[in-house]
Amino acid sequence: MDNFSKVPLIKLENITVSYPERGIVLDNLFLSIYKGDRIGIMGTNGSGKTTLLYTIVGLIKPKNGEITIFGKKMEKETDFVEVRKKIGFLFQDSDDQLFSPTVEEDIAFGPLNLRLPREEVEKRVEKTLKLLGIENLKNRFSQTLSYGEKRIVAIATILSMEPEIYLLDEPTTGLDEKTTKKIEKFLIENNITFLIVSHDISFLKKICSKTYVLEEGKLTTF
């Protein structure tokens, strides 16, 4: 069964977003994300890439258009609250992601918020630490980490939730080559659905099955 015969996990139709100081950022934009899609988005600074991600998860309200997620139209904040539990959203700024005292608590926060049993949460934390090779950071205070360490821990907070779809904003920024390779390996080898915003064209070429450029408020195939 091909993608065109399935219902998209996320569908944006005629989405327009504008800011008073910048004018229109997203201009009647269309985007459908199906299960199994591995999508990359590129664009210059200020082109609206982060705005697009924020709009999908309801942090920015579009001027017009419809957003449908998991088959349900997003009409109010409570709709987004429910779907956010199934979406792994990585902020561009890791400090927006980390707010617990320790790394272990930050990684456990998402699964605990999903009301998973404590034993399952502990398993997920250990699994995620091992997957990313950051067991040594487990008991560190999150706010004492370096920029790169914060980035990888922020990614860990997403992985531990095991979401249905990943929305990642510049996931490899500030990471060394070894850590970037670990992220690439995870994205390539696991059967997951993702939309990734990145300036790193070579990174997107390795992991994505389709890539778009966001320019003048619209998406075009790269």
Image: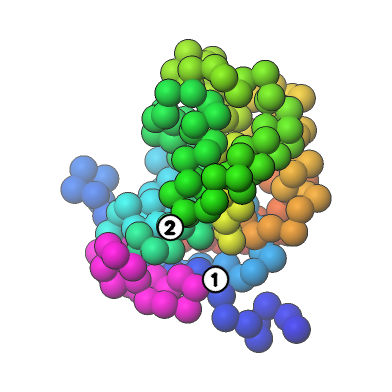
Query: Disc 1 on helix, strand or loop?
Result: loop
Query: Residue 80, relative to residue 125: is it above or below?
Result: below
* Residue found 67% across the figure and 64% down from its top: 37
Q: Which residue is mark 2?
A: 84
Q: Is residue 90 left or right of residue 72?
A: right
Query: Disc 2 on helix, strand or loop?
Result: helix
What's the residue type where badge 1 is placed? Leu
Q: Is residue 121 left or right of residue 65?
A: right
Q: Nearer the viewer, residue 112 or 20?
A: 112
The label number, if any, that marks residue 214 in the structure image? none
Q: Nearer the viewer, residue 181 or 46?
A: 181
- Report, in whole angstroms, how far the alpha carbon at label 2 lies from the one at label 1: 13 Å
* Residue found 73% across the figure and 28% down from its top: 133
| Residue 86 position in % (x across, y down) | 51, 60
* Residue found 74% across the figure and 36% down from its top: 131
| Residue 56 position in % (x across, y down) | 42, 59
| Residue 11 position in % (x across, y down) | 48, 72
**In the image, which is nearer the foreground, mark 2 or mark 1?**
2
Query: Residue 43, relative to residue 6: is it above or below?
Result: above
Q: Residues within 10 Å of mark 2 (few under 14, many from 20)?
A: some
What's the residue type where badge 2 is placed? Arg
Which quarter of the rendering shows the C terminus? bottom right
Q: Nearer the viewer, residue 196 or 76?
A: 76
Q: Quadrant of residue 136?
A: top right
**Residues in magenta, as a range:** 62-79
Question: Can the viewer see residue 63 in this picture?
Answer: yes
Q: Nearer the viewer, residue 218 or 117?
A: 117
The label number, if any, that marks residue 9 in the structure image? 1
Query: What's the coloring here?
Result: rainbow
* Residue found 62% across the figure and 20% down from its top: 137
**Mark earlier in primary sequence (2, 1):** 1
